[in-house]
């Protein structure tokens, strides 16, 4: 018998203090239950406050000003087309880097694509990437991305005006602003800011980047793909600037048959690293972004639609799509026109800059939190069948950041709860037994905690939940 806990949806709408007291008041269920405690981070509050809606507006206006950013548009002009747009993005990253003493490594990343349905002739697909190298674990990466290119009704139309203000100048402007803010700090892991190309023609920029990262052995722990973060008025008339969506796929695409069989018996369907990345971002919203609640969506993307997080998911990396809650389809992929009194086209007047700043701030605190935290626990294992206790074990941390680790936190939740409900800080150990907690009744995970109190995402045991090495 135990007291029914309020739903996590309700919990997420309460202040953390209210949540804690609520949990305490219902913690009659077992003395072994431990409330979720967390060290508030002033630096993350500062980061959230530094994100500027004015900067985002300026950058979206600039990107819209290139007329079209279609992947097949012209590349020689300095004022119109995809070439001018990407050169400007690079110059912005260069300026941001100059302001932090050269802290960013800025480069074009490209490949020639041809023979594709939406890119029939050889075309250079060129992304712009800026890397803020970490101090102690520079080969560990968290990535924020947006897409440079735009389109109108005909996906092959490379000449008509195609402002792409929301889809996706908003995402690129967010990436630039996050780079401005985060480049003022130094992190343990590396943070990558990516303006990816060729999205509308078939996710080419993401494919190129994910393949190169894999080849270079990047340990990618998170991709936060921002695709449309500026619209608050849905096509159905709903106006809402207080929620956002995080799309997160379930079981890992690269899961083997053998791993799937194991998962069937030990769980993990809703605990891929991508899902636990989504839970991490959801918590960051509750803690650091006033008046923003995120909706975690347990699917890869919108129904039948795509985005640049997918090529990373395809290779097994944790990656989510962050976007507005209410889409306006009259403003996506449309020729600019008025028909039957309805205005079509992705123009600048559809953007709410404060909202885009809010979602950018959510990205920035999530990236910073992960990049300051130690590496997520590795080789997490769980046992405890036919006994009234649950044992978790994980590998000893290695590398330069060992000195920065305060210890580990074990998390658990009811199997139908969307967010972690209970936690216990267990010190700097490599195994811990939760007495009087029956393994069958909860899902479990482990996070690593730095001496300052920064936490990694929670890692679910086994291959199903692994964030890799
Ligand atoms: Zn689009």
Image (tube, grey):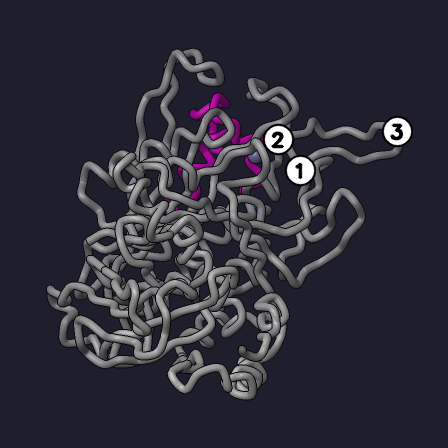
Residue 83 lies in magenta, yes or no?
Answer: yes
Horizontal placement of 30 versus 113: left or right?
Answer: right
User: With respect to residue 178, does 231 lie above or below?
Assistant: above
Query: Looking at this view, is 87 or 321 the one in front?
Result: 321
Q: How dense is the environment of label 1, judged by Cα within 10 Å: few (below 14), some, or many (20 and up)?
A: many
Q: Which residue is mark 1?
A: 346
Query: Looking at this view, is 26 or 229 the one in front?
Result: 26
Q: Which residue is mark 2?
A: 162
Residue positioned 47% across, 76% down in the render: 45
Q: How dense is the environment of label 3, judged by Cα within 10 Å: few (below 14), some, or many (20 and up)?
A: few
Residue positioned 53% across, 71% down in the render: 286
Q: Dot 2: what SS?
A: loop
Query: Looking at this view, is 349 or 239 the one in front?
Result: 239
User: Is disc 2 in contact with disc 1, using a CB cutoff of under 8 Å?
Assistant: yes
Quarter, ligand 1: top right
- Image x and y of residue 404, in percent: 19, 76
Q: Earlier in the sequence, mark 3 or mark 2?
A: 2
Magenta stretch, residue numbers: 62-91
Q: Which residue is mark 3?
A: 340
């Amino acid at each position: 018998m135990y007291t029914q806990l309020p739903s996590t949806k309700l919990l997420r709408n309460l202040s953390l203090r209210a949540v804690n007291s609520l949990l305490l008041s219902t913690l009659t269920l077992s003395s072994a239950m431990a409330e979720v405690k967390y060290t508030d981070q002033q630096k993350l509050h500062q980061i959230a406050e530094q994100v500027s809606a004015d900067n985002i507006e300026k950058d979206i206006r600039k990107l819209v000003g290139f007329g079209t950013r279609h992947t097949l548009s012209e590349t020689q002009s300095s004022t119109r087309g995809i070439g001018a747009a990407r050169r400007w993005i690079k110059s912005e990253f260069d300026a941001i880097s100059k302001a932090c003493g050269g802290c960013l490594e800025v480069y074009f990343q490209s490949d020639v694509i041809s023979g594709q349905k939406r890119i029939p002739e050889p075309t250079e697909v060129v992304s712009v990437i800026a890397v803020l190298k970490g101090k102690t674990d520079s080969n560990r990466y968290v990535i924020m991305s947006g897409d440079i290119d735009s389109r109108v009704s005909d996906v092959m139309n490379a000449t008509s005006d195609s402002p792409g203000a929301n889809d996706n100048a908003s995402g690129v402007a967010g990436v630039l602003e996050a780079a401005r803010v985060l480049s003022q700090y130094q992190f343990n892991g590396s943070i990558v800011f990516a303006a990816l190309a060729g999205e509308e023609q078939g996710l080419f920029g993401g494919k190129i980047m994910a393949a190169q990262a894999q080849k270079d052995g990047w340990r990618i722990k998170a991709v936060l793909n921002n695709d449309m973060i500026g619209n608050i008025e849905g096509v159905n008339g709903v106006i809402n600037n207080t929620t956002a969506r995080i799309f997160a796929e379930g079981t890992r695409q690269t899961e083997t048959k053998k791993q799937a069989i194991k998962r069937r018996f030990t769980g993990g369907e809703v605990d891929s690293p991508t899902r636990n990345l989504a839970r991490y971002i959801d918590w960051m919203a509750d803690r650091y972004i006033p008046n923003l609640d995120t909706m975690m969506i347990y699917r890869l993307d919108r129904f039948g639609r795509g985005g640049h997080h997918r090529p990373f998911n395809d290779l097994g990396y944790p990656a989510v799509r962050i976007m507005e809650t209410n889409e306006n389809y009259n403003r996506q992929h449309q020729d600019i026109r008025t028909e039957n009194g309805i205005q079509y086209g992705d123009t600048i007047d559809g953007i709410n800059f404060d909202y885009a700043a809010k979602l950018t701030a959510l990205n920035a605190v999530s990236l910073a939190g992960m990049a300051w935290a130690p590496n997520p626990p590795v080789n997490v294992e769980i046992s405890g069948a036919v006994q009234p206790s649950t044992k978790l074990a994980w590998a000893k941390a290695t590398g330069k950041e060992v000195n920065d680790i305060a210890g580990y936190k074990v998390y658990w939740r009811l199997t139908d709860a969307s967010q972690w409900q209970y936690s216990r800080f267990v010190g700097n150990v490599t195994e811990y037994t939760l007495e009087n907690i029956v393994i069958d009744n909860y899902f479990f995970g482990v996070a690593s905690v730095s001496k300052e109190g920064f936490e990694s995402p929670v890692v679910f045991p086994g291959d199903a939940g692994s964030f890799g090495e």
